[in-house]
Structure formats: structure tokens, C-alpha cells
Image (cartoon, rainbow, N blue to C red):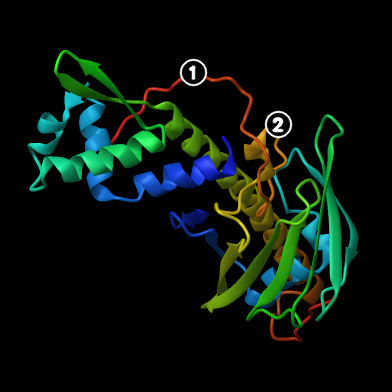
Amino acid sequence: MGTDRLSIVFGALADPTRRALLARLADGEATVAELAAPFSMSQPAISRHLKVLEHAGLVSRTRQATARLSRLEAEPLREVTTWLARYQRFWDESHERLDDLLAALQAGEERRSGPDRNSEGNHDE
Amino acid sequence: MSKTAITAEPGIPMVIVTREFDAPRDLVFRAHTDPDLLVQWLGPRDLTTAVDRYEARNGGTWRYRQTDADGNTYGFHGVFHGDPSPDGIVQTFEFEGAPGHVCLQTVTLADRGGRTLLRTVSASPAASAPPRPSSALGSSTSTSSPCTRSRSAPADGYSPARTTWS
């Protein structure tokens, strides 16, 4: 996923109404009227949110007879979570290794300075 | 031990990484500025890190390379701004695979009664997206680095996942 698209998806998700719309669409396709029903928000306002979601590739819209149905598209969500998971993995693993290294360094210093920790601050370079 | 927390503000090209370590501040600082220690922890275990330069002082430059199991090597370099101290290690960061996309990274270390709270803020002013690991970009290899920008989409060809919302 290109950098810009990732930004667009994050931007689209950064709104509680849009997340609620996606949650509703996870249960199946819906019309704007159906989507607007639980909100104290006009249908045009809901349509504007849908447009943002559509632009991010999170929602696709099809016409069925006179109704326009919105449908959840999960792929961008997967891309976002993949990105986050890799970033998380880089730091998780780095920090686990740093935990181990810090423990080893402290154990080493304890051995060198003996049981009396007050003898002198033994920080070598 | 403690869990690494990552925060990305939507629309703002900045990522914040925090983690608490069971070690005094000076030691965590040393692990960030002594290249012999740095190579022992930076990056996932399947990457080997080699430091070419690491001049931890105001205006000093640094460069390191990370190599994966397949022998692919990725270079990174930057400059220290101000003398690094536990109150702040400020440096620029550039992935050599995406030259020109320079990111600013600030590491602060706070004493938590003998333990140390690490906080890394990575901001990429020129970018329109959060700083991101290079591995998110294209290759399936794990060449992630804290603050690099992407060029292309992952080519893994995966199919849409079932996504749950809470």
C-alpha cells in the first residue's frame, strides 16, 4: 500500500461515526437510510462520511433497483494492521533484546563490584 | 516485562514508541549511544547490525547497516543534534533506500525510581504519512526500521481478511 493511501485509510478511521458505520457494515450491506437510523445525523451527513470511507477504499457502493447499498471492503484494514504489526514487531523485538542486554550488563557489573553495592559506582565505558 | 506501546496520530506524520525498562537511566542511555551495545539490540533478531560510524556528540554523524538472512543489506545514516544526554538524544534518520526522506527522532529517558521510561518520537516533516518501517513497503523481508518511508505497496497478494470490530 502506498504511503498516501495508508494516510487516507488512517484518516478515514480517525472518526467515531465512520468507525461505527464500518462496524454496522460488517454485519452486511445497508442503505444510507439504514445507516443513518441509529445516528442523530442527517442522511447527507452520513453520505459525506460514506464518501470519505469510499475514497479510502473501505466501502464500495452499488446500486440495486432504486437503493444504493454500501458494502464494507476489508482489504485496506488488513493492510493497515499489517503495517502496524510490522512496526510493532520491530520495536517489540528490539526492546526484548534491550531488556536482555540491560539485565546482562547489570549482572556483570554486580559481579565485578561484589555484593557491597556501595563500594563504588563501577560504571565502565 | 513491560509492553511496548506505539501511538500514531492519524493525519500527523509522527509515531511515538514508549517502553519501561528495569534498568537505571544511565545504562539505558549507554545502550543507545555506545555502538558496541547498540548492535546487540537494535532490530529484530534475524537482522545483523553493523555500525560504520557512531559519533554520539553534537554534529556527529552515524551510519549503520542491517543485513537479513538472505544477505540483503539496508543502510541508514543521520546526524546528532546537540550532545546526546538521557534528557534527549536528538538525531536525523534517513533510510538509504529512500534518500531525501529525512526523519527527526527524539529519544528521552525518564527515571522511574530506578527503572527507566523510554520514549521515542519519530516525526517525518516532509512526509504525508507516519514514518514507517521499510518492511511495510514491498519486500516481505523484515528490514523494518524505525523511521523510513515507503515507495510501493506490499506485493504479498493477500486476500481480504475477515475483520472484527469491537
Chain of the residue under the numbered disc 2 shown in the image: B
Nearer-the-camera pick, B29 or A118 = B29
Would residue B112 appear left or right of B65 to someone viewing this image? left
Chain of the residue under the numbered disc 1 shown in the image: B
Where is the C terminus of chain A found, in terms of image quarters? bottom right
Residue plotted at (8% across, 39% down): A38
Nearer-the-camera pick, A84 or B98 = B98
Would residue B5 appear left or right of A62 to someone viewing this image? right
Give whichever of discs 1 and 2 has the lower sequence position: 2
Q: Which residue is mark 2?
A: B139
Give the amino acid type for the residue marked by disc 1 in the picture.
Ser
Badge 1 element? loop
Res. B57 visible in picture? yes
Residue B161 lies in quadrant: top left
Would residue A12 appear left or right of B18 to someone viewing this image? left
Q: Which residue is mark 1?
A: B159
Vertical arrangement, residue B115 with respect to residue A103, above or below: below
Q: Position of residue A36 (x, y in %)?
A: 12, 38
Where is the N terminus of chain A found, in terms of image quarters? top right
Give the amino acid type for the residue marked by disc 2 in the picture.
Ser
Q: Position of residue A83 (x, y in %)?
A: 55, 40
- Badge 2 crowding class, 10 Å Cα cut-off, few under 14, some 14 to 19, many 20 or more, is some
Residue plotted at (82% across, 74% down): B56
Vertical arrangement, residue B153 with respect to residue B113, above or below: above
Separation of marks 1 and 2 at Cα, in angstroms: 17 Å
Q: Position of residue B75 (x, y in %)?
A: 83, 50
